[in-house]
Amino acid sequence: MVSPPVLLLFILCSCYYIAHGGDDEHRSSVTLEPRRATVSVPLVHRHGPRGPSRNSDKPSFTERLRRSHARANYMMSRASHVMVSAREDDANVSIPTHLGGSVDSLEYVVTVGLGTPAVPQVLLMDTGSDVSWVQCAPCNSTRCYPQNDPLLDSTKSSTYAPIACDTGACRKLAGDHYQNGCTGGGTQCGYAVEYGDGSKTRGVYSDETLTLAPGVTVKDFHFGCGRDQRGDNDRYDGLVGPRFSLPSLVVQTSSVYGGAFSYCLPARNSEAGFLSLGAPPGAANATGFAFTPMRRLPGVATFYMVTLAGISVGGEELDVPPSAFRGGMIIDSGTVVTGLPHTAYNALQAAFRKAMAANPLRPNGDLDTCYNFTGYSNVTVPKVAFTFSGGATVDLDVPSGVLLEDCLAFHESGPDVGLGIIGNVNQRTLEVLYDAGRGKVGFRAGAC
Ligand SMILES: *[C@@H]1O[C@H](CO)[C@@H](O)[C@H](O)[C@H]1NC(C)=O
Ligand SMILES: *[C@@H]1O[C@H](CO)[C@@H](O)[C@H](O)[C@H]1NC(C)=O
Ligand SMILES: *[C@@H]1O[C@H](CO)[C@@H](O)[C@H](O)[C@H]1NC(C)=O
Ligand SMILES: *[C@@H]1O[C@H](CO)[C@@H](O)[C@H](O)[C@H]1NC(C)=O
Ligand SMILES: *[C@@H]1O[C@H](CO)[C@@H](O)[C@H](O)[C@H]1NC(C)=O
C-alpha cells in the first residue's frame, strides 16, 4: 500500500506502530506487545447460548436458508456484474449502489472493546463488508433497535472524536460510494450503508480507540457511530467487516498485521471460535495450512474468491471437468450452504447419496438431500474434500462441515459457467486465512 510519508508516533516509543489505509487521515496506530504478529478475538454463533440473540428470535431452518440463498444470489450477481464489466474493458466500471451483502443471514458475532475505558461490543462478522459500525447513544427506539448491551455512549469515552467533513478519511468514504452527509452542509462526516436485504445504518463517521485484546489497542479506528438503523436487526451491537477495502479493520491495521486475517467457525453453536488479525509465523507456508491463490476480481476489492479444481467424496474424486469450476467460488462467512455449479452439484449429490445409501432420505422442501437418522445409532458420513487450484486439498469436518440439520449442506447455484459460493457450514473448524498481501487463501483443519 503506497502512502504519504508517515512519521508521527515513532517518536514516542518503539512499540507504537502506524497503520494506514492509503491516505493520510485514514491511519490508525496500534499498540501491541513487541513482535506480536497476530491478535485474536472470540467468535460465537449469533443464535447459540453464548450469542446475543434470544432463543425466540432464532429463525426457522426454512427462513435461515431463504436468507442464505438471497445473500448468495446477491453476492454472486454483484461479482458477475463486476467480472462482466471488467471483461468488456469498460473504464467506467460502476458498482451497484447497494454496498454490502445482506446482514440478516450473518451468523457469527465477535466481541471487541470500543472507547476509553473500553466497552464490550458484540458485532456481526461479515467478510462481504468493509465499514464497521455500532449503534450509538443518544438514539430512541424508532431509530435504534433493541440490543443487549447499553448503546455506546461517546460522552463517556475520553478518546472519541467525530471525523470532520474536510478530511481525507471522509472524502475517501464518499469516493467509495458511501453516501456521506457532508453534501448537506454539515461539518461532521456522515456515513450511510444499505445492505442487500434492505437493512440500513446511518450516522457519524467517527474516530475511537478499539481494543482487540488486553493491551492490544488500535488508536484512531474509523467506524460508523450509528444513529438510524433499519432492518431485521437482532440484538447485536453493530457489525465489523474484514473485507479487503479501505475502511475495513483489516486495511486500517494493515501496516501492523499485513492486511491478513483469519477466522475459525466452531463445529457447534455452544462452542467458540476466533477472528484473528495477522498471518501466522512463516505465513507463506505456515505449518498446517494448505494454500491456494486468491482470485482477484479485476480492479475492485469486493469479495474473497478462490478456484476449485475438484471435489472428492469418501476419498473418490468426482468426475467433474475443471471447466465446470471456471467461474470461481466466493468464500463467504454469511452464506450458510455452499452453492455449486450444476455439474459439480449433481456429481456431489449422487456420490454422497450413494455413500449414504444405508440411511433413509427424508423429504425436505429446502434442501434435496436430507436424512432421517431416527433409530440409526451408527451413521457413517463420508469424508468430503475440496481440492483448490494449486493442489491444496482440504477435508471438511465430518459431520459438522458437511451436514446441516441432517441435510447435505450444498445446493445448486446455477449453470457451469457461473460462480459458486462456499458457505459457512463447510468452513466449520477450519482456520480460513485471507492473506491479501501474499494473494493467498489458506485452510488449516481442526483449528477450533
Ligand atoms: C466513461 O464515462 C465518460 C464520462 O461519463 C464517457 O465520456 C466515456 O465515454 C465513458 N467510457 C466508456 C468506455 O464507456
Ligand atoms: C426519535 O427521534 C427522531 C429524531 O431523532 C424523531 O423524529 C422521532 O420522533 C423520535 N421518536 C420517538 C418515538 O420519540
Ligand atoms: C517453506 O518452508 C521450507 C522449509 O521449512 C523453507 O525451506 C522454504 O523457504 C519456505 N518457503 C517460503 C516461501 O517461505
Ligand atoms: C423418521 O423415522 C421414524 C422411524 O422410522 C419415523 O417414525 C418418523 O416419522 C420419521 N420422521 C420423518 C420426519 O420422516
Ligand atoms: C458402525 O459402522 C462401521 C462402518 O460401517 C462398522 O465398522 C462398525 O462396526 C459399526 N459399529 C457398530 C457399533 O455397529
Image (spheres, rainbow, N blue to C red):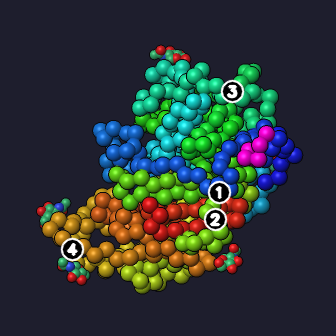
Marks 3 and 2, the one that precedes in the sequence: 3
Q: SS at mark 3?
A: strand
Q: Residue furthest right?
A: 5
Q: What's under tag 2, amino acid-wise?
A: Pro
**CB of mark 2 within 8 Å of CB of mark 1?**
yes
Q: Is mark 4 within 8 Å of ligand 5?
A: yes
Q: In this image, 255 relative to 151: left or right?
A: right
Residue placed most toward the observer, 398 or 277: 277
**Residue 220 position by quadrant:** top right
Q: What's under tag 1, amino acid-wise?
A: Ala
Which dot, 3 or 1, sits closer to the camera?
1
Rounded to the nearest angstrom, the CA distance separating label 3 from label 1 is: 30 Å
Q: In this image, 371 relative to 37: left or right?
A: left
Marks 2 and 1, the one that precedes in the sequence: 1
Residue for point 41% across, 49% down: 45
Residue placed most toward the observer, 104 or 395: 395
Rounded to the nearest angstrom, the CA distance separating label 2 from label 1 is: 7 Å
Q: What's under tag 4, amino acid-wise?
A: Asn
Label 2, on which residue? 281
Label 4, on which residue? 378
Marks 4 and 3, the one that precedes in the sequence: 3
Q: SS at mark 1?
A: loop
The x, y position of residue 124, in whole percent, is: 50, 44
